[in-house]
Image (spheres, rainbow, N blue to C red):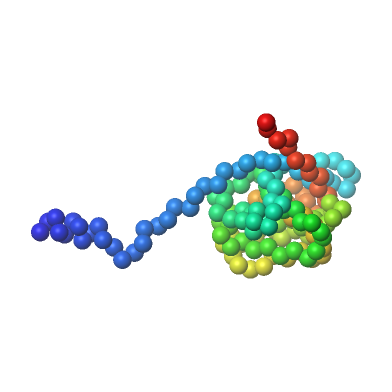
Amino acid sequence: MLLAGSLLLGCRDEPEPVAMRTIPFEPEGVLAFVGPDGRVIRQIAIEIAETDSARARGMMDRRSLTSRQGMLFTFPDAAPRSFWMANTPVPLDIIFVDADSQVVNIAERTTPLSRERVESTGPAQYVVEVRAGFSDRFGLTDSTRVRWRRLPEES
């Protein structure tokens, strides 16, 4: 009888919680935020999302992001862009950048796990995602520009 009771305690109607996997940050490039005077405000390591699948995945399921890391989304042309935070548990600043590397607008402190659309206010060819509060902390505005380069591939 005790054995049967123990077996019943092990059976539940509730599913076990599924642990979210940790996706490691793998730097592929370096991006600098540059002020109107040409000085570098802040430089970060970036992952580069340049394919449809990489752009769709973005920062989904990432559990952490430091102030020295970010993700650069590149597109073949400048157009109005729309992002959302579904499956993204970390709050982000989303920075929309035009074809000339000028910041178009910044969506600060986006809501994690939200399906609400975050949109550019004009055509953007690049989008940079950084940790929430980054833009305020480093004084980024629509007069900020970005410069980026890919890291050399290891052989």
Compared to 117, does 140 lie above or below?
above
Q: Residue at x 78, y 41 (%)?
A: 149
Q: Nearer the viewer, residue 57 or 14?
A: 57
Question: Where is residue 7 drawn, in percent x and y?
Answer: 20, 57
Quadrant of image for the N terminus: bottom left
Q: Tell me if I can see residue 138 in this picture.
A: yes
| Quarter of the image where the C terminus is located | top right
Please give the name of the residue rendered at 78% of the width and 51% of the height, measured from the top-left corner: 140
Residue 121 image position (x, y, % from top left)? 79, 66
Q: Residue furthest top?
A: 155
Horizontal side of 133 relative to 120 (left or right) equals: left
As drawn, is 2 to the left or to the right of 38? left
Does any portion of residue 68 appear in the rendered image? no
Specify the farthest residue to the right: 37
Q: Quadrant of residue 4?
A: bottom left
For this view, does 61 lie left or right of residue 58? Answer: left
